[in-house]
């Protein structure tokens, strides 16, 4: 686990798979730590992620694909979604756990 905004404290070519959640875009650093035939999996929040709490967001897929295109080849792109009915206490927990709380 590391914040890929800057230097990632791992040796060159250390990983076969890297997961980027919310698309930290230090592509050169992610390329450095992936082995030659490694895979990068990028997970982005949907524009309607937590829409009931934050309002509509923006769709970052096209921008993220373009950002990574100079270091990586897109193999697949999928949208996956789920929903949950939460009680007030659980909703408060979600609010406390989001990357940029309200």
Image: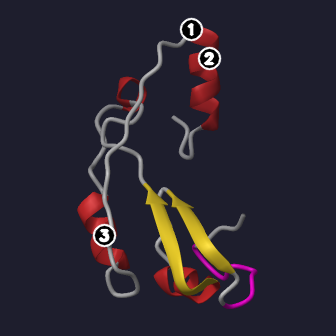
What label sits on residue 65 in the rendered view?
Answer: 3
Residue 10 against residue 54 in the figure, above or below: below
Per the image, is 7 magenta?
yes
Q: In 3D space, how far apart are the residues under numbered discs 1 and 3 (Cα atoms)?
A: 36 Å
Q: Are marks 2 and 1 in contact (CB under 8 Å)?
A: yes
Residue 68 against residue 79 in the figure, above or below: below
What label sits on residue 25 in the rendered view?
Answer: none
Sequence-wise first label, 1 or 3: 3
* Circle 2 crowding by C-alpha within 10 Å: few under 14, some 14–19, many from 20: few
Q: Are marks 3 and 2 in contact (CB under 8 Å)?
A: no
Per the image, is 98 magenta?
no
State the image coordinates of residue 35 (x, y, percent, origin top left): 60, 86
Colour pattern: secondary structure
In this figure, which residue is indicated by the disc labeled 1? 87
The quadrant the N terminus occupies is bottom right
Residue 90 against residue 87 in the figure, above or below: below
Closer to the eye: label 1 or 3: 3
In this figure, which residue is indicated by the disc labeled 2? 90
* Circle 1 crowding by C-alpha within 10 Å: few under 14, some 14–19, many from 20: few
Residue appearing at x 63%, y 36% in the figure: 97
Residue appearing at x 50%, y 87% in the figure: 28
Q: In 3D space, how far apart are the residues under numbered discs 2 and 1 (Cα atoms)?
A: 5 Å
Residue appearing at x 59%, y 70% in the figure: 17
Q: In 3D space, how far apart are the residues under numbered discs 3 and 2 (Cα atoms)?
A: 33 Å
The secondary element bearing badge 3 is classed as helix
Q: In the depicted view, which residue is nearer to us: 77 or 57?
A: 77
Residue 33 is drawn in which quadrant? Answer: bottom right
Q: Main secondary structure of the magenta part?
A: loop
Residue 58 in the figure: left or right of residue 43 = left
């Amino acid at each position: 686990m590391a914040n890929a905004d800057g230097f990632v404290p791992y040796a060159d070519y250390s990983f076969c798979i890297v997961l980027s959640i919310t698309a930290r875009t230090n592509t050169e650093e992610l390329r450095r730590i992936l082995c030659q035939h490694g895979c990068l999996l990028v997970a982005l929040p949907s524009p309607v992620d937590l829409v009931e709490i934050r309002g509509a967001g923006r769709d970052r897929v096209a921008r993220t694909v373009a950002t990574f295109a100079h270091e990586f080849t897109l193999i697949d792109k999928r949208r996956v979604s789920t929903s949950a009915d939460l009680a007030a206490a659980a909703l408060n927990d979600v609010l406390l756990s989001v990357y940029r709380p309200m």
